[in-house]
Amino acid sequence: MPEITFRQAIHDALVEEMRRDSSVFLIGEDIGTYGGAFGVTAGILDEFGRDRVWETPISEETIVGSAVGAAIVGMKPIAEIMFMDFLTLVLDPLANQAAKVRYMFGGKATVPMVVRMPSGSGTGAAAHHSQSLETILMHIPGLKVVAPSTPYDAKGLLLSAIRDPNPVCFVEHKLLYKTKGEVPNGEYTIPLGVADIKREGTDLTIVTSEIMVHKSLSAAEDVSKEGISVEILDPRTLLPLDVDTITNSVMKTGRLLVVHEAVKTAGWAGEIMASVSESPAWDYLDAPMRRLTGKDVPIPYNRFLERAAVPQEEDIVREIQAIVSNQY
């Protein structure tokens, strides 16, 4: 299979679906001539024109509100929010309208739209452009939340998201755009709500997503030299959550560590741990469940402080060693 970047995988999914379905269109700031803040939509305007690529003023609420209306009347908008931090500006149309319409109308109206949102720290973009706000979205019934970690997952999940009759929030960590991975030629989809085991292991399960998948894989490789076998499980879809795959993994390994970049308080690590505690996996635990998350602080601009605010590979290694040796 050819190896392409995460950015290219998303770009290819957009183009392929726009060619396949004339009801699909893009809407957002600087997505046409400029090609998007991270270059994902570069060149798409040249092929599809301004009828299918809508460049908007700097008004996130207008972008998502327009997408909601278009989706209700049969279009399939893909809205880009330049940074996930601006999610706070779109919660009214997203949470109060898009998420509720299908339920309120008994299924007679649907909202088939995707909201793409680059997330996360690591680029020196400071407190207003570096947040991970997935848990806010997970709290809203009616939304689906997708957070891929590889180019293969990004393309397959985005195609499924575009074809889903419900509003889907598609989270793209900014540090992943340049990463590469194998992606098959031709069309393929990955069903929403199905987790993926990125690495098999027997001593400890790590549930993690996005950039933390890669950091956890590196940490797992490091501790393998000590004879510790770590299983890395990527939910890929945070809502709906594949609880069965998670609990089956924990039943196999007997230990659980949840790693995410979002802040600790009310972060989705707590949801994972609660789900395990309510499942048969609870009786298989050989050690207390643990979580390793971002600090409860705004992301600093200083690069050393920024790095200290979110988990790094060495932090994951220390946590693995502590759990396996029962020294927390």
Image: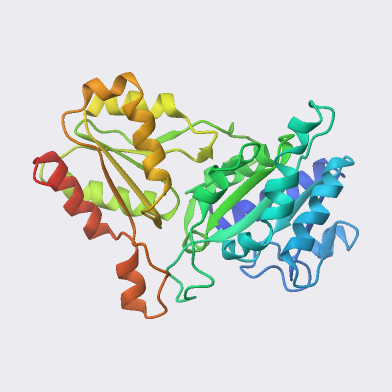
Q: Residue at x 83, y 62 (%)?
A: 54
Taking depth in this image into account, of 146 and 269 the one nearest to the observer is 269
Residue 20 place in picture, x, y as percent: 81, 41
Q: Residue at x 55, y 55 (%)?
A: 172
Residue 63 place in picture, x, y as percent: 77, 60
Taking depth in this image into account, of 170 and 226 the one nearest to the observer is 170
Q: Residue 60, located in which quarter of the rendered image?
A: bottom right
The relative height of residue 89 versus residue 159 in the rendered view (above or below) is below
Residue 62 place in picture, x, y as percent: 79, 62
Query: With 178 as the anchor, is 310 left or right in this view?
Result: left
The relative height of residue 269 versus residue 51 in the rendered view (above or below) is above
Mark count: 0
Query: With 117 as the anchor, is 204 left or right in this view?
Result: left
Q: Residue 192, located in which quarter of the rendered image?
A: top right
Q: Residue at x 23, y 20 (%)?
A: 283
Taking depth in this image into account, of 154 and 184 the one nearest to the observer is 154
